[in-house]
Image: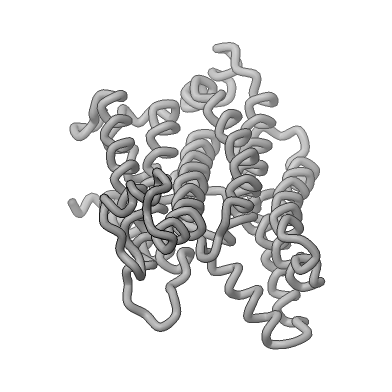
Amino acid sequence: MSRLALPRWSLIAALAALTLAAAIASLLFGSVDLSIARLIAAATGDGDMVARVILFDLRLPRTLLALAVGAMLGLAGAALQGYLRNPLAEPSVLGTSNAAALGGVAAIYFGLAELHPAVLPLLATGGALASLGLLFLLAGKAESPLTLILAGIAVGTLAVAGTSLALNLSPNPFAAMEIMTWLLGSLENRSFDHVWIALPCIAIGTAMLLWDGRALDALTLGEDAAQALGTDLRRTRMRLLIGTAIGVGGAVAVAGAIGFVGLIVPHLIRPLTDRSPSAILLPSAIGGAALLTLADLGVRMVPTTNELKLGVVTAFLGVPVFLIHLMRERRIW
């Protein structure tokens, strides 16, 4: 057990408090700051019209999406790292994020996104589920994590190639710019329509990933030992992959391609636990919600001509985690 480890519920309570503080800050601050009194008045229907529009049309749906998407990405990263026993695992390792992004790109490229606001999210989620079918086809009945990783790399590479092809053949620079903007990831200009699209997928994915905490603990002893302890590896893999595809597909559908959250959050949480996979799942979900909400708040607070994209910020956040992990491996500390 790590010397920094905290009691499970103390860690969860601390992370929940951090997440709540981040959510409140996200509602208060932006290009126009709201005081707490003005925020409460707007929430109760007694505030001025400007404050109500800022709260309900702009900040509240954006904050809810940041919390939900961050929780899903953090949980998916923790679950995949536990199942694959690979500290660098995240949703993109299985090609899920890339395939969901390709579905969204297809909606933009063929002009389908203009038909109805729900078309792009539906195609993004469909892309994630289609990648799951291809992943099962390539991996077959093999139970080895290495086989699954190799199949995921193949699926992800194919999806990236499709996205690059769409950019290459884009009929005009405006379409290419729209595709690139979506690929960079953002929660800007999101509404409650996006919240209702994402939440069912994220709720289903979260429930399926939290189900297998004990199975992930058993897998730390190896596949044979896990089976001897009564773990059904095939069902565990099915639940984990389907949960990841549905949840991450729903997240990418409304937020675009946001990377590194699923990678860095489990690394930040793990030293505070007993390092068992089951102990990391729920804290990683809460930590992911806090991290993405704070990152989105930072995006709005940085004074720039054009708002920074959330995926760019999370990519920069991933670099220090990589360096710290590298130095620990080299035993520099």
Q: Toward the viewer: 328 or 217?
A: 217
Q: Position of residue 27 (x, y in %)?
A: 37, 54
Q: Toward the viewer: 7 or 252?
A: 252
- How many marks on residues? 0
Task: Please name the residue shown 55% across and 19% down the image.
Answer: 226
Q: Is residue 93 visible?
A: no
Q: Position of residue 75 (x, y in %)?
A: 48, 39
Q: Toward the viewer: 234 or 253?
A: 253
Task: Please name the residue shown 76% across and 73% down the image.
Answer: 109
Asked if 314 appears above or below 216 in the picture, the reply is: below
Q: Toward the viewer: 2 or 289?
A: 289
Q: Is residue 328 left or right of residue 251?
A: left
Q: Position of residue 240 (x, y in %)?
A: 62, 33
Task: Please name the residue shown 51% across and 50% down the image.
Answer: 65
Q: Is residue 22 visible?
A: yes
Among the 4 quarters of the image, the one containing residue 54: bottom left
Farthest residue in the bottom direction? 173
Asked if 221 appears above or below 187 in the picture, the reply is: above
Image color mode: one colour
Q: Is residue 168 left or right of residue 52?
A: right
Task: Please name the residue shown 51% across and 65% down the image.
Answer: 188
Q: Position of residue 149 (x, y in %)?
A: 62, 47
Q: Is residue 4 left or right of residue 244?
A: left
Q: Is residue 274 left or right of residue 213?
A: left
Assign the N terminus to one quadrant of the image: top left
Among the 4 quarters of the image, the one containing residue 5: top left
Among the 4 quarters of the image, the one containing residue 142: top right
Asked if 10 appears above or below 100 in the picture, the reply is: above
